[in-house]
Amino acid sequence: MIRIAVIGAKGGVGKSTVVNGIAKVLSARHRVTILDISSSRTLCNIHGIRGSLEDGHDYMIDQGNLKIVSMSSQLSSSFNLSKIKDKYDEIISETDYLIIDYGVHIYDKIVSGEMLAFYGVKSDPTHVIAVSSPQEFVIMSTEKNDRIIY
């Protein structure tokens, strides 16, 4: 499996657009799963996903080779890894490419929970695509996030 994390230290720079574009191209020939972990839930909102994996309902759409899964909950402070682990393992076992739409807040419990769930069953490396605006502070923050995720 190839795991791709799309990160950025600022909202509105195009992370979700990059995730969506890469996923659409890859899904023409491969099984692709997008995990929307962003607090903005951009891809979930576009595709009408209202729940989250932790909620256990309305958390995924399946478009053949492309699945979009919401791990983002409005109540991320109460995130419970044991509650989602089995379903998460099942989802990632059926994919060739796992593309993660990270939000601005990479220190969120959902982010660390997803990483723990992934590395609990897989040893594949994470490839990072960092998206930034041209402001120096944003670039430096994005580079810092890159080192944390990688």
Image (cartoon, rainbow, N blue to C red):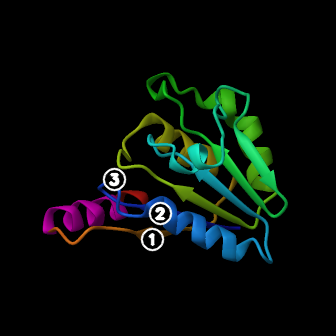
Q: Is residue 149 left or right of residue 4?
A: left
Asked if disc 1 and disc 2 are in contact, CB closer than 8 Å, the reply is yes
Name the kind of residue labelled 1 in the image.
Answer: Ile
Q: Position of residue 94 (x, y in %)?
A: 82, 57
Q: Secondary structure at mark 1?
A: strand
Asked if disc 1 and disc 3 are in contact, CB closer than 8 Å, the reply is no
Q: Which residue is mark 3?
A: 11
Q: Which residue is mark 2?
A: 6
Q: Earlier in the sequence, mark 1 or mark 2?
A: 2
| Circle 3 Cα neighbour tier, 10 Å, few/some/many (<14 / 14–19 / ≥20) | some
Q: Earlier in the sequence, mark 1 or mark 3?
A: 3
What range of the chain is rendered magenta?
136-147
| Circle 1 Cα neighbour tier, 10 Å, few/some/many (<14 / 14–19 / ≥20) | some
Does the rendering let one see residue 150? no
Q: Which residue is mark 1?
A: 129
Q: Is residue 58 left or right of residue 149?
A: right
Q: Compute the Cα span from label 2 to label 3.
A: 12 Å
Q: Secondary structure at mark 3?
A: loop
> Does residue 51 sit above or below 88 in this rendering?
above
Q: Position of residue 89 (x, y in %)?
A: 75, 45
Q: Please state, as top left, top right, bottom left or bottom right, where the N terminus lies in the image.
A: bottom right
Quadrant location of residue 99?
bottom right
Q: In the image, which is nearer the foreground, mark 1 or mark 3?
A: 3
- Is 141 part of what is drawn in magenta? yes
Q: Nearer the viewer, residue 43 or 102?
A: 43
